[in-house]
Image: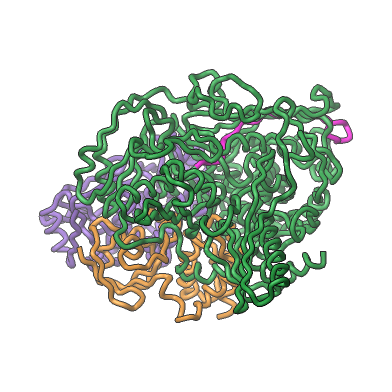
């Protein structure tokens, strides 16, 4: 089936098998592998994207359900050569190790800071509790979100 | 030391891979694609133990989109491979030994076509009773009657299913103490749970060879296993490092490498294989489950007199690195304490459970949990402060380990213990609190009811680098371009630990040049780097790059203005095997160096529901010399989280060899609401044998944090808690 | 496999009547897991995301009509949080923020898992499921709607279109036990209210929801009655014995929260 999605502001079309997730379509059909395939069951947040502005796991959205909708992925955050402030904060705080969780965390953190410009540590932890990281122990990820909020 | 200090103080550019990783622009092994690419799929055994009577692929071959269906008959070269012992079939031949063992392969144009074709492969199994209990394994039929680990210099043990049995006899193991404590401890099977699933892309070169892009920990050892199975010379198999989504030991053994290459060569098309999360649980080895019997004997003043431990490890279906884990568990069983007498008996057995092998901490995690529990018990029996008891027995340079090895390098155990003990935990928080700040978290189970606070303490240590004569090296190649830049080649696997930053940092320092470029890691252009394992790679890669840079500068002095291209191989001090009868060293050393970490943990436990919240962790670690403080802290924090997971929630539950919780829904790893803030103190006592005095830092926090967290739970509950992960049942019943 | 995407409720019901084996999919948090792990290959999926009538909530004669597409996030943070306290607390415990943004109350009922977090608070509040088809609509009490483990009372041509609830304004709470402090499936859970009477319903401790009630003056024995009403099993998430014990503890604590 043909799916038409507006991704990062650009209208794109993909021919999908009906059982494909939005994640698979983004990664394998639209050349946007930034959203990651870590669990494909909504338990890790690595595939987080904004669907019509709402933070979702793209592995749990049927590609067909995104037809006619707006998707924002991690690839759309940086402005040309300039990192998004949340991305820059992740780099500066040392919040990146293997980095497989990073795109999903960056998208979730951007979503949080858009709703709450100066979150408490508890608010950061609850908002990002759906994003698993296996390398960092989260300490520097909390630092990064705090840093991004302070700089804004 | 001046030079070493410069390394630490150098103004560091942020790690080069971080910006692309935050942008989703870093290419992990599952992100790759190529024109004409097919999707590979692995058909796996549903049985823990069975004979294969027949395999019929005829229906599958005829399915739409299918380009190849392969079985063991299609493996052109060696039918078996293995990290240390070639005991594992590329594809099952006439039997399967664990659930998830690869039996056949499919390549198709879409992954769904591959899955549907896989469904049509008819495998006729004759199920056999599984050996699923490690305690009974040595009395049951031998799963490997050919004994692949025999003849490698280990203690002879003819019982069925013994992977390795070793004994360390130190001093007089019959020595009595004035006080003795004993206990039996148990650890469940832990998964590395790296987030990037096993995956890769194999591309045929059109001339019979193949390029394999894969997430691995050691490119050259992969190639050395792949090429014989493909029946190809090593030069025709080029292994390239694709982006690695975490490793933690789980990528030491092969996963899709040979399978992808077989399909690519058979179809003459690029083939990508990506495991899903469920498959990933059978796609790599796990941390060995263990049962450990301990008796610690001490003098009335607290001095350890004799430590006796028996260790049993479940190795699962194949050997992997189990022989080394068996030895590591034994070698570091006592912990960083001096004791004149010890008897350590360590056995790993084959079963029909999933294969176990390397995971961060490598045997030392299991014994640290047991031995540190014993020290707390001993402290209570002697009425001595647990920190004082540890200080009293702390190892120091010049002391002798149970293996007979004298510590010649840096090992500031007492300093590390004092630093951790001096860390001040935050004060207790008043009630009411948001349930997020209470045990049970978002579940809203406690508003303060039943909550007790406890403070725990533990110390752990481990060796750095490979050991017992398995002396691997690291090569680095430096090319000085006449136009003024330098290019470094090193096959070191960047698995997230930041080794590429280390390489660039060292090269820039040594060459006095900013424009240093790191070539992609691959097998074709440089010698082996050895593995991203055993807390070894920062040390080894730094040594190799330093030596290559210095050699390049020397060469440049002789031939100014010309292109310089030199490769150097770095080796650490040589080790020799342990005596198979006594477990004593046969040369100067069996282990290269050691690192120690001490941890203080504050936990709150809801004693009525058995739920927990770790509030705060303070760590002090012996790091030799920190090349990059932020990276070192990141290793401590991340390593701690993995040990916390084992303490509180992580266990692969096997039922008759079947993993009952092969998903992130039921194999739980800590979330941001489970992992507390960590305060780290870095103790810098340069390692004399290491470049710039540095030490590997990845494993010590994982070794100790499980023990430290459970120590805090014991303090909060008064329960013995002899098994991890600690279940709510263990606290409330 | 086919995906059908109706734009109106009438179209959705007509399609369901035509494709009686179609799987409805709303937030996808259960269906996609089955698809991604090759556990199911439904011939037809009925994508309900575009049916505006399923969204939001409305009031009628003192009752609330919660659209089947109401998300956990809307329940957790939206204007209903004070009126449906236990349901709002339950919503906060569901999965992750991402799951709460997509998962819906209708999906939770349709899946009918014993671990469905919305079910105990709805049972305690006496909620009813609106089941609709081209033949008309009917209401089924939630406790009767769930007929077994992952089984519900829907006829093959019906969809869950709403949940009706008359807020009791009784003091109430929801608690959920899991071995991790976020993002867990319930080992067991409990919703409890104290209005005209004590009412409790637990999750993950019986194949079907069970409502336990008692007069307010029997609070002293109520926790024990809740625990006895459970029929828990041993599984990878917990033992039967622990579940029964935990329910007793939860009920005691819940009573203190809502009665005292």
Residue C163 image-quadrant placement: bottom left
Chain in green colour: B
Specify the quadrant that holds the C terminus of chain B: top right
The shade of chain C is purple
Image quadrant in which the N terminus of chain B is located: bottom right
Can residue B44 be found in the magenta stretch? no
- Kindly identify the residue that appears in the image at 79 percent across and 67 percent down: B3
Q: Is residue C155 above or below residue B475?
A: above
Chain A: drawing colour:
orange
Q: Going by the image, does C17 lie left or right of C163?
A: left
Can residue B24 be seen here? The reply is: yes
User: Where is residue B314 drawn, in percent x and y?
Assistant: 55, 32
Specify whether A26 is left or right of B413: left
User: Which residue is most to the right?
Assistant: B301
| Residue B636 visible here | no
Range of the magenta residues?
Answer: B285-305
């Amino acid at each position: 089936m043909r799916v038409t999605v507006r991704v990062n502001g650009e209208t794109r079309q993909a021919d999908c098998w009906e059982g494909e997730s939005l994640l698979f379509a983004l990664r394998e059909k639209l050349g946007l592998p930034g959203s990651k395939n870590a669990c494909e069951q909504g338990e890790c947040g690595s595939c987080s994207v904004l669907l019509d502005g709402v933070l979702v796991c793209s592995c749990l959205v049927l590609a067909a359900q995104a037809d006619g909708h707006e998707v924002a992925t991690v690839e759309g955050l940086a402005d040309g050569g300039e990192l998004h402030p949340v991305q820059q904060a992740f780099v500066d705080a040392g919040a990146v190790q293997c980095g497989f969780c990073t795109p999903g965390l960056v998208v979730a953190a951007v979503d949080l800071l858009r709703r709450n410009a100066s979150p408490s540590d508890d608010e950061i932890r609850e908002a990002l509790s759906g994003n698993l990281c296996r390398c960092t122990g989260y300490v520097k990820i909390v630092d990064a979100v705090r840093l991004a909020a302070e700089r804004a | 030391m001046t030079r070493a200090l410069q390394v630490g103080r150098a103004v560091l550019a942020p790690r080069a891979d971080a910006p692309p990783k935050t942008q989703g622009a870093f290419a992990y092994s599952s992100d790759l694609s190529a024109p004409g690419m097919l999707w590979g799929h692995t058909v796996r055994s549903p049985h823990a133990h069975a004979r294969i009577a027949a395999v019929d692929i005829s229906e599958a071959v005829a399915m739409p989109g299918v380009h190849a269906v392969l079985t063991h008959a299609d493996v052109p070269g060696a039918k078996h491979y293995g990290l240390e012992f070639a005991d594992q079939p590329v594809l099952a031949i006439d039997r399967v030994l664990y659930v998830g063992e690869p039996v056949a392969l499919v390549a198709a144009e879409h992954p769904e076509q591959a899955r549907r074709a896989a469904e049509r492969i008819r495998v006729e199994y004759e199920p056999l009773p599984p050996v699923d209990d490690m305690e009974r394994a040595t009395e049951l039929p031998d799963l490997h009657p050919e004994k692949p680990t025999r003849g490698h210099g280990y203690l002879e043990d003819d019982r069925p299913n013994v992977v390795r049995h070793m004994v360390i006899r130190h001093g007089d193991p019959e020595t009595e103490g004035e006080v003795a404590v004993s206990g039996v401890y148990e650890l469940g099977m832990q998964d590395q749970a790296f987030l990037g699933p096993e995956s890769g892309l194999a591309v045929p070169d059109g001339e019979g060879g193949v390029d394999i892009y894969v997430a691995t920990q050691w490119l050259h050892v992969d190639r050395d296993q792949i090429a014989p199975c493909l029946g190809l010379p090593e030069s025709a198999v080029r292994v390239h490092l694709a982006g690695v989504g975490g490793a933690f030991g789980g990528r030491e053994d092969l996963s899709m490498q040979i399978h992808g290459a077989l399909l690519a060569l058979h179809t003459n098309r690029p083939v990508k294989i990506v495991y899903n999360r469920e498959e990933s649980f059978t796609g790599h080895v796990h941390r060995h489950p263990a049962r450990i019997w301990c008796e610690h004997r001490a003098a009335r003043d607290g001095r350890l007199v004799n430590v006796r431990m028996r260790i049993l490890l479940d190795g699962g279906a194949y050997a992997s690195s189990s022989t080394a884990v068996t030895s590591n568990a034994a070698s570091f069983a006592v912990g960083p304490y001096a004791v004149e007498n010890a008897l350590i008996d360590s056995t790993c057995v084959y079963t029909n459970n999933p294969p176990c092998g390397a995971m961060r901490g490598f045997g030392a995690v299991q014994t640290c949990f047991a031995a540190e529990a014993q020290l707390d018990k001993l402290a209570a029996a002697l009425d001595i402060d647990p920190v004082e008891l540890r200080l009293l027995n702390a190892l120091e340079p010049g002391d002798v380990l149970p293996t007979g090895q004298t510590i010649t390098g840096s090992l500031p155990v007492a300093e590390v213990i004092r630093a951790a003990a001096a860390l001040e935990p935050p004060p207790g928080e008043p009630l009411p609190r948001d349930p997020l700040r209470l045990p049970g978290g978002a579940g809203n189970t406690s508003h303060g009811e039943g909550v007790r606070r406890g403070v725990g303490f533990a110390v752990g240590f481990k060796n750095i680098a490979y050991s017992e004569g398995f002396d691997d090296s690291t090569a680095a190649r430096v090319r000085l371009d006449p136009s003024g830049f330098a290019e470094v080649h090193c096959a070191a696997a960047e698995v997230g630990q930041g080794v590429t930053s280390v390489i660039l940092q060292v090269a820039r320092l040594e060459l006095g040049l900013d424009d240093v470029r790191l070539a992609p890691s691959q097998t074709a252009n440089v010698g082996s780097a050895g593995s991203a394992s055993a807390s070894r790679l920062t040390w080894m890669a730094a040594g190799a790059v330093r030596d290559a840079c210095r050699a390049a500068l020397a060469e440049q002095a002789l031939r100014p203005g010309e292109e310089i291209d030199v490769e150097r191989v770095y080796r650490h001090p040589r080790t020799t095997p342990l005596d198979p009868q006594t477990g004593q060293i046969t040369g100067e050393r069996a282990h290269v160096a050691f690192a120690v970490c001490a941890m203080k943990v504050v936990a709150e436990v809801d004693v009525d529901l058995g739920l927990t919240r770790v509030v705060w962790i303070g760590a002090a670690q012996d790091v030799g010399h920190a090349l990059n403080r932020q990276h070192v802290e990141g290793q401590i924090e991340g390593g701690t989280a993995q040990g916390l997971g084992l303490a509180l929630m992580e266990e692969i539950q096997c039922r008759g060899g079947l993993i009952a919780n092969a998903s992130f829904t039921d194999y739980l790893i800590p979330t941001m609401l489970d992992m507390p803030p960590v305060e780290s103190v870095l103790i810098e006592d340069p390692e004399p044998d290491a470049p710039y005095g540095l030490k590997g830092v990845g494993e010590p926090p994982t070794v100790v944090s499980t023990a430290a967290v459970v120590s805090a739970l014991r303090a909060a509950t008064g329960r013995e808690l002899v098994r991890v992960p600690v279940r709510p049942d263990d606290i409330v019943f | 496999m086919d995906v059908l995407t109706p734009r109106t409720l009438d179209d959705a019901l007509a399609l369901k009547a035509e494709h009686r084996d179609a799987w409805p999919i709303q937030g996808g948090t259960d269906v996609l897991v089955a698809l991604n792990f090759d556990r199911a290959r439904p011939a037809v999926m009925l994508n309900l995301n575009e049916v505006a009538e399923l969204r939001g909530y409305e009031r009628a004669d003192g009752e609330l009509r919660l659209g089947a597409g109401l998300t956990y996030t809307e329940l957790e943070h939206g204007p209903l949080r004070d009126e449906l306290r236990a349901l709002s607390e339950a919503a906060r415990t569901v999965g992750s923020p991402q799951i709460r943004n997509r998962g819906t109350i209708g999906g939770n009922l349709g899946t009918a898992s014993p671990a469905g977090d919305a079910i105990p608070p709805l049972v305690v509040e006496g909620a009813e499921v609106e089941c609709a088809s081209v033949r008309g609509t009917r209401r089924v009490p939630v406790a009767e709607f769930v007929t077994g483990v992952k089984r519900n009372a829907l006829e093959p041509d019906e969809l869950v279109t709403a949940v009706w609830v008359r807020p009791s304004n009784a003091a109430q709470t929801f608690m959920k036990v899991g071995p991790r402090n976020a993002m867990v499936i319930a080992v067991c859970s409990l919703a409890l209210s104290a209005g005209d009477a004590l009412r409790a319903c637990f999750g993950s401790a019986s194949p079907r929801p069970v409502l336990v009630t008692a007069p307010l003056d029997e609070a002293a024995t109520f926790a024990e009655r809740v625990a006895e009403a459970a029929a828990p099993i041993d599984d990878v998430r917990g033992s039967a014995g622990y579940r029964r014990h935990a329910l007793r503890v939860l009920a005691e604590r819940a009573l203190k929260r809502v009665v005292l």
